[in-house]
Amino acid sequence: MQKSKNILIAPLNWGLGHATRCIPIIDAIIKNGDRPIIASDGLALALLKKEYPKQTFIELPSYDISYAKEGQNLRLKMLKDSPKIWMAIRNEHQMLQEIIPKYTISGIISDNRLGLYSNLVPSVIITHQLQVLSGSTTWLSTQLHLHYIKKYDYCWIPDADGPDNLSGKLSYNEDFEIEKVYLGPLSRFKNTGNYQKKYDLMVLLSGPEPQRGIQEKRLLTELKTYKGEVLFIAGKVEKEQKVEKKGRLTYYNYLSTDGLQKALDRSEMVLSRSGYTTIMDLQKMGKKAFFIPTPGQFEQEYLAELLDQKEIVPYATQEDFHIQMLSRVEHYKGLGSIQSSSRSLSSILEETFSSVNENSDPIPSSLST
């Protein structure tokens, strides 16, 4: 009988997108009869603890990423913060040397955490950013990212391999040193076709502070003149779920995956950031949407412009957005117009880690908290 493996899976704590797109991978690990060892920090770790309360968790060093209050200052702030980010990468790499024997790790899956590569067991990095947009410094930021990607055995790309992909030029690079595996889009949701409209608009917030909070205040003010039923998900993962009803607006601090699935099923359109994980989720659900990219976040700005040019999703800058702009949505095709298939995660996991010596001992119960 095949013995189960312990697979370390570690998303970056930058907003919630890296954590949420790891959910289908964690589910596939469990489905294969293996054990996910989940490692992250901050809100990403808190969210996954709520999703998988019975699994094993490890807290990793924080990259301590936050946005500038003014979008044009983001690149300068990231440059200023780079020494502490590199230190966190170094610290998590050193910590990994202890994690592998302690938890009997057979393989590593890192979603954009750059220090979790190893020569002891196969290591995978998940990223759709083989080109890292940063304005005039795009070449440099891309080369820095590729430097770390090449330390991994495989690069899993959550997108289709072809011109009709979701991420445009971001997921393509002709560097043949990188072992690329295109997974197709990743989403924790299922398109059940069970659409029963309850809300005219669903607002879905995410991302690091202070921009998440700035956007929340702006939108709550704009929505005072909106005539439809609104479901507002603030994207704040707190100890307890909170819900408030104010007129035609229902406000949640956060929703679980099951809660968000039901919310998306009942919402006619979505107003959100143009983060890549959000795009994959809304494509899976076949939703119409309106995007407001995070100021200064070149990737989100590029994706929003790309989908607008294709007449799939309209967008506006945070500074220019007004609630009346939502009327543009009806003239766009929506993300349901993009057809793409995803590969079986279970089979990819088996292919990637099949050569690993299988673990014989379960995790001690003292580590399973």
Image: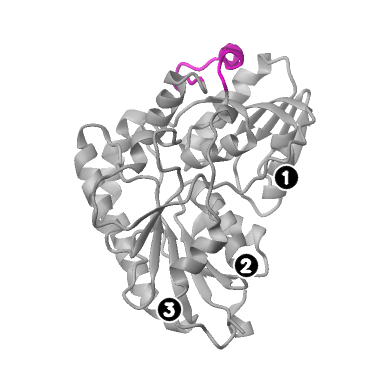
Sequence-earlier tag: 1 or 2: 2
What's the distance in space between the residues labelled 1 and 2, CA to CA?
21 Å
Quarter of the figure with residue 63: bottom left
Residue for badge 2: 30
Q: Are marks 3 and 1 in contact (CB under 8 Å)?
A: no
Q: Tag on residue 259?
A: 1
Rendering coords of residue 153 (x, y %):
33, 65
Is 37 situated above or below 150? below
Residue at image coords 48%, 32% = 274
Residue kind at label 3, given as amino acid type: Ile
Q: Report if residue 256 is visible in the image.
A: no
Is 226 situated above or below 26? above
Residue kind at label 2, given as amino acid type: Ile
Q: Are marks 3 and 2 in contact (CB under 8 Å)?
A: no
Residue for badge 3: 100
Label 3 secondary element: helix
Which segment is the magenta one?
Answer: 314-333
**Across the whole image, how many numbered discs are drawn on residues?**
3
Observer-side mark, 1 or 2, equals 2
What's the distance in space between the residues labelled 3 and 2, CA to CA?
19 Å
Rendering coords of residue 209 (x, y %):
47, 41
Label 1 secondary element: helix
- Is 197 a magenta residue? no
